Image (cartoon, rainbow, N blue to C red):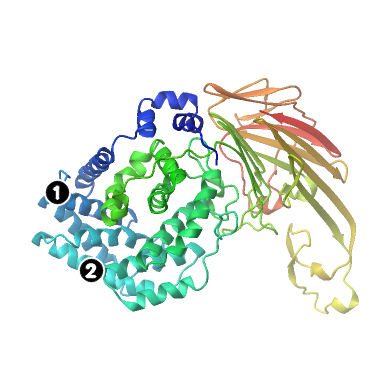
């Protein structure tokens, strides 16, 4: 990574306008962050404010199990035990800790699990144990007589839950490490070789992290969970080798981050593929490894995260818990070295390209899981291109055809050709002949199977039928980036007369100029020719030339969705270019 000035890094990450609006706060936070003592005072103050809210919100009866309950108890424990806190040794805090843990003990099943997220769920119980064990660790050295009930009930709940985790199962890859991290924390409080044995049983399956830094689920949401879990296991067993996949993943996370902290999730196999999360959730991991590894770039990223919107509410308010639980957090960060904001990265494992030129970013995606199956655990996003220029955001582009209701284009990988990236899909849609004699049944009841093109199911034993009248559609999208601008060349050929649609979705709330509003939904537009402009704040994206040869804009998702009355339409300002095969068109976006 290249070295740039600290001020330039923030200016390029946040955009000129954001940088100015945050100054001098940002400048101080980055260039001289204030002293570590002052930052710690800020952490304690945030905890004081959180506890003040809790003393009010916890006044009514607790009626439901929430994951947040663990952090509420941990924050109260931190306030009670931190000498500089306004709540240090204040007896008024103790009844609220007792109230939370009494409720959790009452809600706990005989097997040690809780009902939230899923019923009688070991992994969901593990999530709440992370902060509860932190609370237990913080309270352990405090001999105040008023804490006896709280500490006793905490032990009762944690040990009982430990059995649920030692014996219970999981649903997803990340659950293995969440459960193991919770067991490591329980073992640190109440040592039991059986906990460690179970951790090693899960670890023996292997912690997969590909060469790009992706975990199995390719999810930013669950990468944050896995990183924190592996750090916990690694430091407590101890097994420092578990830090290595975290380092790889954090490297990938940076390249997936937008200047405003949002993370690209189009390649995810989980629910976040349509709901981007923020790099805020990785703060603890960057901070911990920056100190542990003396990593100046991770330190720079941690300091950058501190400047992002939402840091105080979503990170700082719980940070005292981490600083009291693990002494490493109180060590000074190494001097930051700003990472590059000019890069081009091709993640071949997921067929994702990320290009950044200061405040402008390009994302190209061709890594859908095949065959297309609409289910959690599979990457199926049709968003093949995204572009940001400051606050002006093209959320995604999609390409659709009405070729036998196959719907959206999903590239079968990405090929790099010189400075361009090539996305490609070939679809064959056959008709089916009578079954050969040896596959015919007297009762006419044939195998319930999927059509060979994957569009539908029927009791037709498709795999044994000869095919005829095979129609083919071959689509290629060539993307070439030059100094923050992109040229996209579309080619769709084969069967003639197929309606094609290029869909742009810009961030809602912006302004479109040079376009024609379409009848129907208020945010549908087209560009029949020439150039259009999308503006948001002081930033703008120019795109075109437009083309509009037909008005068939329904059913873009295809039969996989329409048969269930589903849609992939999202909030935003939608612009449509249309054509008919054979189709050739080049669009410039910049």
Q: Residue at x 39, y 27 (%)?
A: 22
Judge from the rendering whether residue 45 lies leftward or rightward of residue 510; answer left or right.
Answer: left
Q: Secondary structure at mark 2?
A: helix
Q: Residue at x 19, y 59 (%)?
A: 139
Label 2: how many residues lie within 10 Å, few (<14), some (14-19) or many (20+)?
Answer: some
Question: Which of the numbered marks, if any, corresponds to residue 155?
Answer: 2
Toward which corner of the image does residue 199 lie, by quadrant?
A: bottom left
Residue 501 percent coordinates (x, y): 74, 38
Q: Are marks 2 and 1 in contact (CB under 8 Å)?
A: no
Front residue of 100/210: it is 210
Residue 18 percent coordinates (x, y): 45, 27
Q: Residue at x 70, y 43 (%)?
A: 556
Front residue of 298/529: it is 298
Toward which corner of the image does residue 370 lie, by quadrant?
A: bottom right
Q: Secondary structure at mark 1?
A: loop
Is label 2 or label 1 in front? 1
Residue 265 percent coordinates (x, y): 56, 47
Pick whichever of labels 2 and 1 is earlier in the sequence. 1
Is residue 407 placed above or below 12 in the rendered structure? below
Judge from the rendering whether residue 58 lies leftward or rightward of residue 401; answer left or right.
Answer: left
Question: Which of the numbered marks, if any, corresponds to residue 88?
Answer: 1
Is residue 175 placed above or below 584 in the rendered structure? below
């Amino acid at each position: 990574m290249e070295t740039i000035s600290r001020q330039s890094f923030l200016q390029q990450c946040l955009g000129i306008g954001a940088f100015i609006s945050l100054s001098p706060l940002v400048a101080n936070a980055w260039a001289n962050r204030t002293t570590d003592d002052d930052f710690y005072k800020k952490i304690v103050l945030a905890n004081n404010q959180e506890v003040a809210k809790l003393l009010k919100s916890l006044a009514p009866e607790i009626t439901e199990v929430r994951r947040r309950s663990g952090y509420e108890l941990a924050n109260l424990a931190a306030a009670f035990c931190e000498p500089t806190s306004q709540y240090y040794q204040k007896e008024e805090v103790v009844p609220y800790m007792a109230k939370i843990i009494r409720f959790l003990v009452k809600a706990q099943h005989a097997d040690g699990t809780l009902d939230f997220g899923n019923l009688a769920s070991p992994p969901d119980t593990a999530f709440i144990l992370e902060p509860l064990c932190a609370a237990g660790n913080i309270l352990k050295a405090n001999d105040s007589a008023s804490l006896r009930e709280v500490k006793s009930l905490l032990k009762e709940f944690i040990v009982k839950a430990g059995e649920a985790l030692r014996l219970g199962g999981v649903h997803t890859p990340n659950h293995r490490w969440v459960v193991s991290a919770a067991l490591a924390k329980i073992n640190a409080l109440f040592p039991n070789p059986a906990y460690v044995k179970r951790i090693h049983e899960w670890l023996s399956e292997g912690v997969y992290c590909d060469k790009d830094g992706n975990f199995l689920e390719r999810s930013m949401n669950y990468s944050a969970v896995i990183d924190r879990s592996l750090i916990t296991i690694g430091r407590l067993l101890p097994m420092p080798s578990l830090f290595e996949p975290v380092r790889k993943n954090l490297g990938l996370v940076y390249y997936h981050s937008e200047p405003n902290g949002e993370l690209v999730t189009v390649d995810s196999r989980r629910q976040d593929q349509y709901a981007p999360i923020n790099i805020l959730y990785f703060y603890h991991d960057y901070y911990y490894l920056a100190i542990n590894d003396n990593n100046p770039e991770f330190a720079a990223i941690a300091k950058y995260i501190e400047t992002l919107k939402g840091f105080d509410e979503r990170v700082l308010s719980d940070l005292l818990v981490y600083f009291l639980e693990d002494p490493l957090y109180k060590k000074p960060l190494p001097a930051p070295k700003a990472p590059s904001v000019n890069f081009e990265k091709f993640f071949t494992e997921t067929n994702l390209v990320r290009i950044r030129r200061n405040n402008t970013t390009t994302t190209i995606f061709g890594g859908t899981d095949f065959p297309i199956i609409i289910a959690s655990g599979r990457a199926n996003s049709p968003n093949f291109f995204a572009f940001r220029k400051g606050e002006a955001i093209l959320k995604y582009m999609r390409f659709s055809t009405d070729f036998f209701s196959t719907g959206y284009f999903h590239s079968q990988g990405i090929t790099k050709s010189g400075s361009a990236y090539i996305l490609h899909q070939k679809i064959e849609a056959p008709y089916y002949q009578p079954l050969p004699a040896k596959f015919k049944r007297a009762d006419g009841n044939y195998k319930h199977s999927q059509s060979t093109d994957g569009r539908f199911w029927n009791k037709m034993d498709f795999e044994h039928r000869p095919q005829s009248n095979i129609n083919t559609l071959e689509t290629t999208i060539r993307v070439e980036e030059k100094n923050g601008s992109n040229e996209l060349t579309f080619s769709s050929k084969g069967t003639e007369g197929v309606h094609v649609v290029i869909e742009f979705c810009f961030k809602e709330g912006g302004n479109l100029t040079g376009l024609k509003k379409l009848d129907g939904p208020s945010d549908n537009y087209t560009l029949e020719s020439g150039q259009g402009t999308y503006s948001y704040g002081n930033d703008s994206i120019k795109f075109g030339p437009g083309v509009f040869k037909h008005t068939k804009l329904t059913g873009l998702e295809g039969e996989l969705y329409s048969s269930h009355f589903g849609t992939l339409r999202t909030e935003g300002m939608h612009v449509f270019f249309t054509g008919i095969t054979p189709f050739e068109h080049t669009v410039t976006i910049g």
